[in-house]
Amino acid sequence: MVQPPMGWYLVTGATGQIGRRVVHQLRQQGFPVRAWVRLGANYQDLVDAGAELYFGNVTQREDIWAAMGHVSYIISTHYHAKDILNIHLKSNLHLIEVAGKFGVECFAYISGLGVEQYAQNAPLIEAKLAIETALTKSSLNYIILRPTLLNHYLLPWLEQLQKTGSLILTGDGNLRHSWVSLDDLAKITIQLTQNPALWRQIVPVGGLTPLSRWDIIDLYRKLTQSQPMIIPVPLAFLDGVRWGLQWLNQDEDLGTLKILLSHEFICNESEQKRLQNQLNIQLESLEQFLQRYLGLDHSGKE
């Protein structure tokens, strides 16, 4: 049986979709957690869970140093679409450097499928590839997880659909992705940091059945027994939006989004089965995940 780690976890991006789940699962298992949060963020649930809050600027090297006391494990999940260079790339490179100086046992980083193929003209993917390269070249033990990056948009899309009854579907909605429950992604991340035999790996993570966005819309219809309005929009529309945002100096990395909407991102089924066997877990279906987090059931009641 794998012995649980000693020492603190530092979780960056602790109020994000993945980071929040990581913090809660770690606290449920009794591990000490330092949750890196922003002033003004919604973090009361992390306090209630027993996490220690750390307020700092992730772009400042001195704040990274100050966060490292007693830390043995780092799980990096932070991300900001408007400043990928500083808030994502440079901050993670500094975090890797400082983690090495403090002798951190294991550094887990949430990357994404396709980083090696699609980095050109996609700033977030390019940044993730650079961070992966820095980690693999460092002396640190690491775990790099690669879910489909569209996972980040899934709940916001469906929350919009639930709130407004309509959804703009940009690009080819028939392209498939290996979606994964964010709770399972958090669980896998934690378990991998706790098993030294599985360190220094790049691990694709996804469900066994790839689904298109149209498949997910059909699933939503089934769960809610509703007929939402879907407005298809050609992918070329993003180019016009991107030009306008650049003119206003507010480009939110639509280059990456365009890549994600133009290709399929699918995990190898045998690799996913092997991962589940290694960790002795059974991934939940996307349907189960959406039922819990959108408050949906087969009767259509919320």
Image (spheres, rainbow, N blue to C red):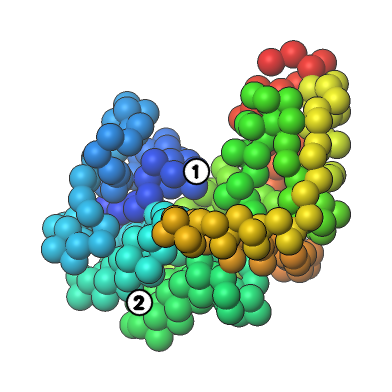
What residue do we see at 62% from left, 51% from top?
Answer: 151
The residue nearer to you, when weighing 155 against 3, is: 155
Dot label at residue 140: 2
Question: In this picture, is 31 found above or below 228?
Answer: below
Q: Position of residue 31 (x, y in %)?
A: 34, 44
What residue do we see at 46% from left, 72% from top?
Answer: 127
Question: In this picture, is 98 found above or below 38?
Answer: below
Question: Amino acid type of disc 1?
Answer: Gln
What residue do we see at 35% from left, 77% from top?
Answer: 140
The residue nearer to you, when weighing 132 against 126, is: 126
Query: Taking 245 as reference, is 280 left or right?
Result: right
The residue nearer to you, when weighing 261 against 109, is: 261
Question: Amino acid type of disc 2?
Answer: Leu
For residue 158, which quarter of the picture? Answer: top right
* Residue 207 appears in the picture as rendered: no
For residue 167, which quarter of the picture? Answer: top right
Secondary structure found at label 1 = helix
Q: Position of residue 160 (x, y in %)?
A: 64, 32
Q: The C terminus lies in which quarter of the figure?
A: top right
The residue labelled by disc 1 is 17
Task: Name the front one of labels 2 and 1.
Answer: 1
Q: Position of residue 109 (x, y in %)?
A: 45, 64
Q: Position of residue 278 (x, y in %)?
A: 63, 62
The residue nearer to you, when weighing 61 against 18, is: 61
For residue 108, which quarter of the picture? Answer: bottom left
Q: Farthest bottom residue?
A: 137
Question: In this picture, is 136 found above or below 11?
Answer: below
Q: Point out the tag, 2 or 1, that comes first from the N-terminus.
A: 1
